[in-house]
Amino acid sequence: MKHYEVEILDAKTKDKLCFLDKVEPNATIGEIKSMFHKSHPQWYPARQSIRLDPKGKSLKDEDVLQHLPVGTTATFYFRDLGAQISWVTVFLTEYAGPLLIYLMFYFRVPFIYAPKYDFTTSKHWVVHLACMCHSFHYVKRLLETLFVHRFSHGTMPLRNIFKNCTYYWGFAAWMAYYINHPLYTPPIYGEQQIRLALTVFLFCQIGNFSIHIALRNLRPPGSKTRKIPYPTKNPFTWIFLLVSCPNYTYELGSWLGFTLMTQCLPVAFFTLVGFIQMTVWAKGKHRSYLKEFRDYPTLRSPILPFIL
Amino acid sequence: MSAPAMGTSKTAHSESGHKKKKGPGTLATAYLVIYNVIMTAGWLVIAVGLVRAYLARGSYHGLYYSIEKPLKFFQTGALLEILHCAVGIVPSSVVLTGFQVMSRVFLTWAVTHSVREVQSEDSVLLFVVAWTVTEIIRYSFYTFSLLNHLPYLIKWARYTFFIVLYPMGVMGELLTIYAALPYVQKAGLYSITLPNKYNFSFDYHTFLIFVMISYIPLFPQLYFHMMRQRKKVLGHVEEYSKVE
């Protein structure tokens, strides 16, 4: 059986970084990355982007050498993705921040409001309820990160964590400031509005969790096999009939509920920004489902039933 | 803040490229020529207005009042440039162009128009003069580029005068905002206070301070970008001269 030779060039400078001879035809890109790592220890596999063209798409770790459009001397281009950090670490950091920051405003630690309000709490019961809901939401996310989610890409670039945390922590501080402010004004329709909002919030939180469980059960641990998600016995998953990414639909619903509960403009703005971002993700996901599965259900839309 | 820098070399470069390939089309080019001619004429009107008012008055104090209306009209008219980028007939970044035009419109309406007390400040004259000269050069540059007959003098002016005009404009802008601060704070201008049913507040005074601070990271980027453009554009001519 013939062997391949593999040379790896820098995507920018075209310098030859590495030459591997006698590589097995059924070697995967993941294995080639490991070999490359031996000669360049500073570039561990997770931070390597290996491409066929200098500006091409990264090859997947499971791609097999002999199935790629290369000759017996394969030329690959390498780009350093920068220091990598695990998704779990990123998510735990992103979500712990809002939880703790919000509580600081709730308990009115010094230097936020006037000194006479230090360590007091609001006189409005809806503010206490909002704190419970906000905390519940982020605790749920933290627990899901630890026990529910599986991540197909194990890592992401370290610099992203700063962007993501600025977003989550910044918005948490912004909304917490106004909700817990001594001059906070409760919802104009009073208890009716609050109860309706709470119902929406809880319904959507349970829905979101149900979808996460369903997605997790879609594939065994460690597997990268992709399947079409379908409704299960759990009624909260029946929305899969109409939507590709119901986790985002329910997430949006949760924040709409929270907006209604608090009647706070920064919360509404956070909901809007989140909706825009999730729509982008949902459309991307929807598109990849359509591309990958010939028999993908046609009735589904990305994030809002029938609409969007 | 200073005039939109993007779209200068890109416009010239892409324009010639586009002519060979697809380009914005005859209709779009004709429209852009008309737009740029009108804007050049508009800023010339402002320039002439300034000079006439100065000669008539013998002093540069209070010149703002003689050019207030055309300044507002033509500076606000620049909003169309964001649309040009968005539609794609000008190959510049929508975000960058939008940011630069909006910062000018913001200063025109939200600061100078809104705080009448600063209108008689000399700093207003600083940025108005800087803007006027910059814009006459910039719009005539675009006009001639679109017509493929760009005089060297205008190109040279485009990539040389900014060295003085950009810092001058920024100084005028910052001093004007600074002068407006006490009046904004006293009047609570454009500010929303608690309590209110939206549970949201906004302090325009603080916002203006943040705007001033934002010049620190943003202006150098723009200035040195233009410096690099200058080397790229005027440097070629030098090379050409050497070859000759």
Image: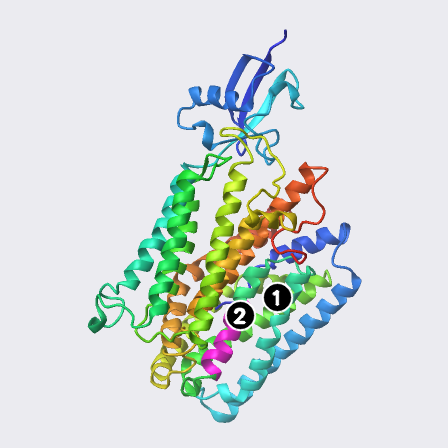
- Is residue B103 in the magenta section? yes
Task: Classify mark 2: residues with Cα within 10 Å, few (<14), some (14-19) or many (20+).
Answer: some
Residue B214: quadrant of the picture = bottom left
Which residue sits furthest right? B26
The magenta stretch is: B101-113
Give the colour scheme of this rendering: rainbow
In screen coordinates, is B157 left or right of A154? Answer: right
For the point 74% across and 59% down, the residue is: B24
For the point 36% across and 71% down, the residue is: B209
What is the chain letter for disc 2? B
> Is residue B180 depicted above or below A225 in this figure?
below
Q: Is residue B163 visible?
A: no
- Percent of width and height locating residue B162: 51, 65
**Tag 1: residue type?**
Ile
Q: Would you name the residue on which mark 1 appears? A: B82
Q: Nearer the viewer, residue A270 or A66?
A: A270
For the point 61% across and 61% down, the residue is: B155
Q: Are marks 2 and 1 in contact (CB under 8 Å)?
A: yes
Q: Would you name the residue on which mark 2 appears? A: B102
Which residue sits furthest top? A1
**Tag 2: residue type?**
Met
